[in-house]
Image (cartoon, rainbow, N blue to C red):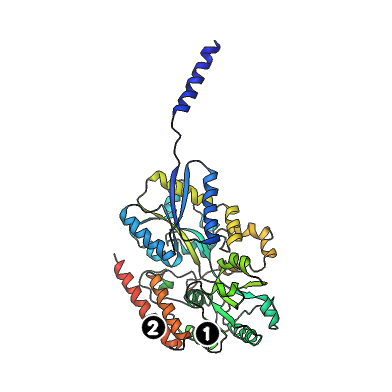
Amino acid sequence: MTFAFLRPALLAAAVVAAAPVQAQTEIQWWHSMTGGLNDWVVGLANGFNASQKDYKIVPTYKGSYDDSMTASIAAFRAGNAPHILQVFEVGTATMMYSKGAIVPVGKVMADAGYKFDPTAYISAVVGYYTAPSGQMLSYPLNSSTTVLNYNKDAFRKAGLDPNNPPKTWPELTLAAAKLKASGVSCPFTTSWQGWTQLESFSTWHNTLFASQNNGFGGTGARLQVNSPLHVRHIENLANMAKQGLFVYRGRGNLGDAPFYSGECAMATASSSTYASIKKNAKFDFGIAPLPYYPDVAGAPQNTVIGGASLWVMAGKPAAEYKGVAAFFNYLTNAEIQAKSHQTTGYLPVTLASFQMTEKSGFYKQNPGTDTAVNQMIRKTTDRSRGIRLGNFVQVRAIMDEELEQVWAGKKTAKDALDAIVKRGNEQLERFEKANKG
């Protein structure tokens, strides 16, 4: 009796032991994060991999945002593109119009049985990556915005109130003059000059950067950054440069390091600089909203989104897309979002993670870290929702080239901005022709 009872159980155990262990489905994720942010990305992948047994996220650094986009296009044509590609926000329109190359995240999530609730996200963030139909196009992994970082120790030395940073551009100019008089060689600088001084500047002042609601209305958008307000602002910065109050340190994020080192006392930069400032700065620092012109109606409004999102590449088996959806669902967890926000300075993508961070006392313990969120949760308008243009990478390069001519005293603000509009619109026209029909 006992032997007969045990025989089926032993047989079943033998079958299980003999059966091959089901391999995890690998999901390839190409990204552009370096240093501590690379550690963060790897940590997200490891956390998801440990949370379940069916899928394995494999993060791979593929160079700069420009490099990874180029590599992904070549890989897609060769039939070996990654499942997930991190793309910076200026590549959004290019990805949107890449027919057959991407699968909208909203579809991937729905097909896997996950619900997408737009109201759970910070509106300015999810709105940027969502189509007019309401379908989510990409997953907003690392969204940032522009802020003003300032050196509180330098403020004290210059006789400025370290707890009252400049709120307007006239106030910033006066503060820069006092900082220079106190011996600071670089009172003010900026990173990502086109993003901070033209793109975010526009939305912050509820002023169009481009027609058709900054490109959200279609590919027929054209630049409008030579308005009287834009000319006024670039002229003011040019005058500051002549007086040594504004010191240009180079393209991209080259303005960040001089602030970390204490050389520059004020800098407009990405909110994602928080982690690096906290790690590298040997001084007391503060984070403040972008300055604005107080006589401009509607200012301040809200700043423009930066950072990057995750796009799902087409041509993969349905079973693998389920793994992608499971990973995105994991990333939406409020605790994971809150930890990412507090670690990196990137925005908390969901309202729940923002509220969780607020309740934890993080913002009180780290004053200014809620600046980016507060700038982005203001009610957006059609003019301030964001900027979504084709060939935007090329347009950014044109802005860099022309603004550098202004800082060097070789062009007037008006001439440079007119050139940005003319040259930039040529890029927009090319994109429109390539994506008709």
- Answer with the quarter of the image where residue 121 lies: bottom right
- Mark sitting on residue 201: none
On the image, numbered disc 2 is attached to which residue?
Answer: 419
Instruction: Say which residue appears at 30% left-offset and 68% top-offset.
Output: 434
Q: List the single residue furthest toward the top.
A: 1
Badge 1, how many Cα within 10 Å: few under 14, some, many 20+?
many
- Answer with the quarter of the image where residue 277 lies: bottom right
Residue 82, image x and y in percent?
40, 53
Residue 126, image x and y in percent?
50, 61
On the image, numbered disc 1 is attached to which residue?
Answer: 237
89 relative to 23, above or below: below
Quadrant for the C terminus in the image: bottom left
Residue 156, image x and y in percent?
70, 79
289 relative to 355, above or below: below
> Looking at numbered disc 1 in the image, what kind of residue is underneath it?
Leu
**Residue 359 seen anywhere in this rendered image of the structure:** yes
Residue 52, image x and y in percent?
52, 42
Left or right of 105 in this view: 160: right
Badge 2, how many Cα within 10 Å: few under 14, some, many 20+?
some
Question: Front-most of 328 and 208?
Answer: 328
Quadrant for the N terminus in the image: top right
Question: Front-most of 234 and 435?
Answer: 234
Left or right of 229 in this view: 172: right
> Looking at numbered disc 2 in the image, what kind of residue is underneath it?
Ala
Secondary structure at badge 1 equals helix
Left or right of 44 in this view: 227: left
Q: Are marks 2 and 1 in contact (CB under 8 Å)?
A: no
Question: Front-most of 126 and 306?
Answer: 306
Of marks 2 and 1, which one's residue comes earlier in the chain?
1
Secondary structure at badge 2 equals helix
How far apart are the alpha carbons under marks 2 and 1? Answer: 18 Å
